[in-house]
Amino acid sequence: MRPPTIRDVAERAGVSKSLVSLVLRGSDQVRPEKRQAVLAAVEELGYRPNAAARSLSERRTRTVGVLLNDMRNPWFVELLDGLGSRLHDSGLHMLLADGRLNRRLGEDLTHTFTELRVDGLIAVGTLPPSPALRTAAGQIPTVVAGAREPVLPRMDIVAGDDEHGARLATEHLIGLGHQRVAHIAGQGVVGELRRRGFEAVMREHGLADTAIVEQGDLTEEGGYRAMVRLLGAAGRPTAVFAFNDIAGVGALSAAEELGLQVPRDLSLVGYDNTYLSRLRHLWLTTVDNASHDVGRRAAQCLLDRITAPDRPSETVLVTPALKARGTTAPPVTSGRRP
């Protein structure tokens, strides 16, 4: 049995095919009784619009390409939830691509999005410089979410206020009485902003001489190796602020393997407030980067840019908040612990 067509709906409702199309597009130019007749016919027949045909007629695919820096990063989960819910509310669907796979295959999946004629593109996380992304941003509405680069004409950026978030983490550790504080640094503009916030607070408290920066990356292994180096050096820190939760988990593993108890012997702060930080056996103090809100705002920026492609570029910063949990406490030598 063939599926019902728009012609069948029109015949059942006693109207023209063009009027059925107006109703399905949500037009307000249809009389209420006609609209009700069409909707009743749609329900009775079980009609589902042909997405491909609708795309051709509207010259829109109602899809948004989402290019993730690395799909393994748990920070993207809540961002994608916020992003997807807002896009869904507007009748748009997400197509996901993994930037890590891009690099492994030696190709740029941004080309695929442009070939599929997506209505917009959202780049999530810090991605390597890409000629394809630059080209796509000049052709279709594009937004960067959760990162601060690249900066291109007619492209919006929505991210957390990374420098402020790093200040919150560092102030928390100093407020507990720690003076020898280290930072496991990240990469790119976001890494630089978090490092800048850390160093500024240490300097403001007269602790610049005891501030330590150990370069890491975005991975658990990177956090582990950075912590091993920190704890193997003379004058080891009593507290560590990691670039993200994943690096924080690696740092925690290294500390425990070296015989230290967290937070008795070492305090540790992560960043992003991913589900990892909320696991009971970790219960990691971290900075909530408001990723769900970043996702929703990025989606709204894209919707606005689809409507007005030539409007000026906008940078939206979402305010982070500290989530104090079980991996931070005053240092034993401070006299503030029983």
Image (cartoon, grey):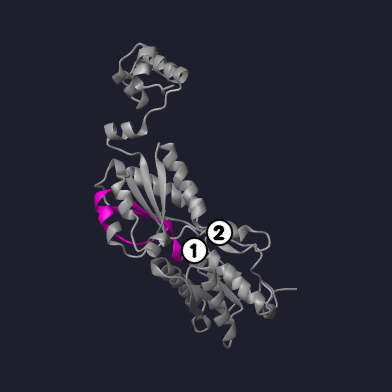
Q: Is residue 25 left or right of residue 267?
A: left
Q: Is residue 192 magenta?
A: no
Disc on the earlier residue, 2 or 1: 1
Query: Start and end of the magenta stretch?
Result: 134-163
Q: Is residue 17 above or below residue 127?
A: above
The quadrant where residue 260 appears = bottom right
The quadrant where residue 177 appears = bottom right
Residue topped by disc 1: 165
Indicate the quadrant containing the N terminus: top left, top right, bottom left or bottom right.
Answer: top left
Give the residue drawn at x 72%, y 73%: 337
Q: Is residue 154 visible?
A: no
> What residue occupies the far bottom of the structure in this picture?
234
Give the residue drawn at x 44%, y 16%: 40
Towards the viewer: 28 or 68: 68
Residue 187 coordinates in the image, percent (x, y): 42, 70
> What residue occupies the far right of the structure in this picture?
338
Towards the viewer: 168 or 23: 23
Residue 73 coordinates in the image, percent (x, y): 50, 60
| Mark 1 residue type | Gly
Residue topped by disc 2: 273
Q: Is residue 43 above or below residue 314?
A: above
Residue 53 coordinates in the image, percent (x, y): 31, 31
- Secondary element type, mark 1: helix
Q: Are marks 2 and 1 in contact (CB under 8 Å)?
A: no
Residue 71 coordinates in the image, percent (x, y): 47, 57
Q: Residues within 10 Å of mark 1 (few under 14, many from 20)?
A: many
